[in-house]
Amino acid sequence: MFKNPLMGLDYPDVDVIRVEDTYYMVSTTMYFMPGCVILRSYDLVNWEIAGYVYETLEETPGHRLAGGQNIYGQGMWAASLRYHKGTFYICFVANDTHKTYLFQSESVEGPWRKQNIEGFYHDAALFFDEDDRVYIIAGNSAIWLTELKSDLTGPKEGGIRRIIVEDKDHPSLGYEGTHFYKINGRYYAFFIHSLRTEWFRTEACFSSDSLTGEFTGGDILQDDMGFRHSGVAQGGIVDTPDGKWYALLFQDRGAVGRIPVLVPLHWEGHAPVLGINGRVPLQLEVTSTRPDYRYEPLYASDDFDYKPSEDGKIHLKRVWQWNHNPHNELWSVTERPKALRLHSGKICENLTQSYNTLTQRTSEPESAAWVTVDGNGLKDGDYAGITALQGCYGAVALTRDKGEYALVMLGKSSPETSMTEDYGHTLPEKEYERIPVDSPVVTLKCRTDYREERDEAEFYYEKAGKWIPIGSSHKLTFKLDHFTGCRFGLFYYSTKETGGISDFLKFHYETV
């Protein structure tokens, strides 16, 4: 038995496939690097990180947080994952470069070969038909089916190019998030959209006997599991070796992010039916293809004790992702053994501009992380600490001013508007409390609380073996400015001069 949602972590825009006894899931990672995470499972409930498709996607100023630019809320979105004749395919667009990317590999662990598909295909689904012709199905409101060349470099001259479903003049969210299949000789297109009468994410499906025929259908799931009027929708479907079917969708869960939900699926004639009596079950029994398999956790503590791998490179634990492209010349886990050392690389107005912020997803219902910061190498105006990273972030940091050290709790607040009304505007950064300290070595803690829709972060420092709160509870809000769930982040930045260093030791992560 398992409980929905699945893992309490931000893995949105999921697509899922099965190859023999193994399930693979791909999820949006936007501006976090390495990017385009692939997860592996043998029961559709427990998942581990199998790898990432790329270390970095591009080297633009936005990807590198250079020149005041960034790709918050952009980067890679809603990948399509397929396996065809021994090759894995990943297809997605990046909303900052306006390119469509295609990666291919014989293993989900890589290496992956990169190319572009001519055109821009929003929320695309890649589809290989039985006759080896290949298509891409994408769009918003108007869903286009486009036949591709055999080398997948762009549209095929004279190939099929048509609208299969259209949701004209929708006042909110029209059909998007396409997932496309051929099952028992019939073609199926699954979408997410909102109800026209109110904001409510809903799953829809249309089908046809042919790619040139009429696609008919409608809504097949409208349920929020009793949570915030937040509908469960968008994702892929998959069958098990013993013939059962499931949909792996996601739900907006507030500041923690968008979390996968497993929904049973059965067929009534040609029609897919989701849920049990139209509802997503809060508990469900599943079968594992490898019952004794032990999964690597999706979050982890770290003592930063690393040595180069066989390829001569340092590979951090897979749970870590950098905020934007890392500047590899400015971080190290070998300069000081058992420490993550960050070098200051530029002057920043706030921590969202800083290079080399190292992140992990927070978890519902509660999660906490703490780390020891050695600030002996700080310069005046430097900040080093731990953050609950979102557009409306909160943080606790060690800082130095005129040679004196202090602890500060700082953050940005969000106006009381909905995600769609506001498009993610945040208020200016504010310092909530400052406490002088004698030592440049401190242990700092961030705790997130998503119980009963609190969506709050609290911050602490350690003194005489006890956690002392600093500042106040900080409201976290999921907004379109960052468009990702809240993460723990280890950060270091300068406001006056560069050239300093900060060391992070003994990172601990725990959940309730």
Image (tube, rainbow, N blue to C red):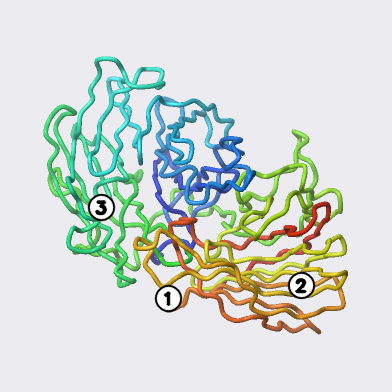
Q: Which residue is mark 3?
A: 193
- Looking at the rendered structure, the kind of residue marked 3 is His
Residue drawn at x 27%, y 20% as measured from the top left: 131
Q: Nearer the viewer, residue 303 or 192?
A: 192
- Report whether 140 appears left or right of 90: left
210 relative position to 451: left or right: left
Label 2 crowding class (10 Å Cα cut-off): few <14, some 14-19, many 20+? many
> Helix or strand or loop: what does disc 2 sit on?
strand
Question: Residue 229's x, y, as percent?
Answer: 29, 69
**Is residue 5 or residue 155 the one in the foreground?**
155
Q: Amino acid at mark 2?
A: Thr
* Dot label at residue 443: 2
Badge 3: how crowded within 10 Å, few (<14), some, or many (20+)? many
Residue 150: assigned label:
none
| Circle 3 SS class | strand
Question: Viewed as shown, does residue 386 lie left or right of 80?
Answer: right
Quarter holding the N terminus is bottom left
Q: How dense is the environment of label 1, judged by Cα within 10 Å: few (below 14), some, or many (20 and up)?
A: few
Choose the circle earlier in sequence order: 2 or 3.
3
Question: Disc 2 versus disc 3: distance between alpha carbons?
Answer: 45 Å
Could you tell me which residue is drawn at 68 percent across and 56 percent down? 348
Q: Nearer the viewer, residue 158 or 319?
A: 158
Of all residues shown, which one is farthest toward the top?
157
The quarter of the image holding the C terminus is bottom right
The amino acid beneath tag 1 is Glu
Residues under numbered marks 1 and 2 in contact, where contact means CB atoms less than 8 Å apart: no
C-alpha separation, residue under disc 1 versus residue under disc 2: 28 Å
Could you tell me which residue is drawn at 81 percent across and 59 percent down? 503
Q: Is residue 113 above or below residue 344?
A: above
Instruction: Check the image and report above or below for 52 versus 350.
Output: above
Q: Residue under circle 1?
A: 453
